[in-house]
Image (spheres, helix red, strand yellow):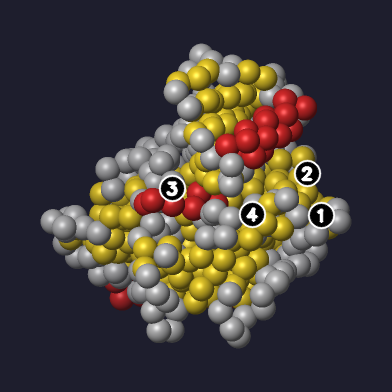
């Protein structure tokens, strides 16, 4: 323990061989204030600060925290001597398209780095890249805002109208308000490949072929190792969690009750999509396969000419789309008949989504591409007539939002504005939870809330709260500290 005036710091690490835990825990005492910082070795981590009535109580609380960690295997260490654990970043190749014509691209936005994450909703298009940038655009390509996250974005997922970004730092950020926050912190031994969120339950697939399930309060529920490694597919609904890996697709009961079915696929799974009654697996052996959610039976196969990096469907699975490793995009009818194949005009599609006769792609060159997938536009493209691609530029003054890492970074108000909702941080069962103070809400339910700005007794004002299955609230809109 080192001392500088009234400040003392204890720094611990837990690093296990063979891909186990690789994380740190730091406790700093400054008078009556105890600050805890924790996370993956080499990362900034999360910070929690607590103020105690006396310096003696602060020291006792700090000693208790350190003792708990030491008993779990943490040991004193020198910060910076142990290297961060390597994070897998998908290595992909992209060959030129062999298609005879190019897709009718309406607009293209170059994000500046390799991009994997995409989501398109009624109002906006979202794209996340390896630099940690998430941009929102309208459907005509105008850039609306930027979220600046601490590490590369693995994927973007939606759960109702909440948007989450899974990042290389092991955290999953809620981007549904101007103050993005780490809603989930995945264990250091989980090398994230993909994730999905359903009704607040986070499902994570990883390099080792494991499936890890975490609830809305960031508490581990269950984990299971599947039959194959490199699990790039994870999709979830009320009936099951669908996990795609090198050996096929496995469905598990949502409560961890066991395997429901397993189906070998034609090649290792590289991407997954779902509709109400079926899941779609894009594989390294040049096919997309449609599997029944009820039984796992293969219902249709969609043959491409190269390894399939991504796939998607129109509503109900009427049309099936695929992007391959050779910069081509395909469309099939429901039964597997190929309707067309066109070049993307800018790399291979690593993720995709269809919406309102448009196909949105994120490609190996880091671009978000909007393709006109209407019948008229595709027919014209096959005959060699395509629109002039509009290259989208960043606005001169683009709103940029970054996660708050301390209470001081949060805007404050002296009173709750009309129509807003007041929440309060409370100690419960040894953990700091957030409950609703305003009338008309269930006071015993927890609120999914940024951990970095939780303090005992602190009150915050939020614009809106929405109930979720499982009995908790989610925040919509701004978060402000109530003085």
Q: Do labels 4 and 2 touch, CB within 8 Å?
A: no
Q: Nearer the viewer, mark 1 or mark 3?
A: 3
Q: Residue at x 54, y 69 (%)?
A: 423
Circle nearer the N terminus (1, 3): 1
Measured as percent of width and height from the top left, residue 355 is found at 42, 71
Give SS at disc 2: strand
Circle nearer the N terminus (1, 2): 2
Around disc 4, counting alpha carbons within 10 Å, would you say few (fewer than 14), some (14 to 19), or many (20 or more)?
Answer: some
List the residue tagged with mark 1.
256
Q: Is residue 324 visible?
A: no
C-alpha span from label 3 to label 4: 15 Å
Q: Residue 424's quadrant in the figure?
A: bottom right
From the image, which quarter does the C terminus lie in?
A: bottom left
Measured as percent of width and height from the top left, residue 421 is found at 49, 77
Circle nearer the N terminus (1, 4): 1
Give SS at disc 3: loop
Q: Residue at x 44, y 52 (%)?
A: 407
Q: Residue at x 81, y 54 (%)?
A: 256
Measured as percent of width and height from the top left, residue 78 is found at 54, 15
List the residue tagged with mark 4.
432
Mark linked to residue 406: 3
Circle nearer the N terminus (2, 3): 2
Q: Is residue 144 visible?
A: yes
Around disc 3, counting alpha carbons within 10 Å, would you say few (fewer than 14), some (14 to 19), or many (20 or more)?
Answer: some
Q: Do labels 1 and 2 touch, CB within 8 Å?
A: yes
Around disc 1, counting alpha carbons within 10 Å, would you say few (fewer than 14), some (14 to 19), or many (20 or more)?
Answer: some
C-alpha span from label 1 to label 4: 27 Å
Q: Do labels 2 and 3 touch, CB within 8 Å?
A: no
């Amino acid at each position: 323990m080192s001392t500088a005036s009234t400040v003392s710091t204890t720094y611990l690490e837990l690093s296990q061989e063979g891909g186990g835990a690789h994380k740190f825990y730091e406790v700093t005492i400054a008078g009556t204030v105890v600050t805890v910082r924790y996370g993956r070795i080499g990362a900034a981590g999360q910070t929690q600060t607590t103020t105690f009535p006396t310096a003696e109580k602060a020291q006792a609380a700090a000693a208790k925290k350190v003792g708990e960690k030491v008993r779990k295997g943490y040991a004193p260490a020198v910060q910076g001597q142990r290297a961060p654990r390597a994070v897998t970043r998908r290595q992909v190749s992209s060959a030129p398209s062999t298609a005879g014509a190019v897709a009718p691209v309406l607009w293209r936005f170059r994000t500046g780095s390799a991009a994997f994450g995409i989501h398109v909703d009624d109002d906006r298009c979202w794209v996340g890249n390896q630099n940690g940038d998430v941009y929102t655009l309208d459907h005509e390509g105008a850039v609306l805002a930027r979220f600046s996250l601490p590490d590369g974005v693995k994927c973007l997922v939606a759960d109702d109208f909440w948007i989450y970004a899974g990042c290389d730092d092991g955290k999953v950020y809620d981007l549904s308000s101007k103050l993005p926050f780490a809603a989930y912190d995945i264990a250091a031994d989980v090398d994230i490949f993909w994730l999905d969120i359903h009704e607040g339950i986070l499902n994570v697939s990883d390099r080792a072929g494991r499936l890890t399930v975490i609830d809305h309060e960031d508490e581990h529920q269950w984990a299971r190792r599947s039959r194959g490694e490199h699990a790039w597919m994870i999709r979830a609904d009320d009936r099951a969690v669908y996990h795609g890996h090198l050996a096929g697709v496995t469905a598990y009961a949502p409560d961890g009750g066991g395997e429901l079915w397993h189906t070998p696929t034609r090649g290792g799974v590289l991407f997954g999509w779902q509709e109400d009654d079926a899941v779609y697996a894009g594989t390294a052996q040049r096919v997309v396969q449609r599997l029944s959610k009820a039984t796992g039976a293969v219902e249709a196969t969609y043959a491409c000419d190269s390894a399939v990096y991504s796939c998607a469907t129109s509503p109900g699975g009427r049309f099936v789309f695929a992007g391959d490793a050779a910069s081509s995009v395909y469309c099939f009818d429901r039964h597997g008949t190929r309707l067309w194949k066109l070049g993307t005009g800018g790399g291979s599609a690593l993720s995709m989504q269809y919406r309102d006769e448009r196909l949105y792609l994120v490609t190996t060159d880091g671009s978000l591409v909007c393709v006109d997938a209407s019948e008229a536009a595709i027919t014209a493209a096959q005959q060699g007539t395509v629109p002039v691609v509009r290259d989208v530029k960043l606005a001169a003054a683009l709103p940029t939002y970054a996660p708050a890492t301390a209470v001081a970074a949060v805007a404050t108000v002296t009173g709750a504005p009309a129509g807003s909702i007041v929440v309060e941080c409370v100690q419960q069962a040894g953990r700091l939870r957030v409950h609703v103070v305003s009338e008309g809400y269930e006071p015993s339910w927890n609120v999914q809330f940024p951990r970095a700005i939780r303090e005992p007794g602190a009150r915050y004002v939020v614009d809106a709260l929405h109930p979720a299955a499982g009995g908790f609230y989610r925040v919509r809109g701004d978060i402000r500290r109530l003085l």
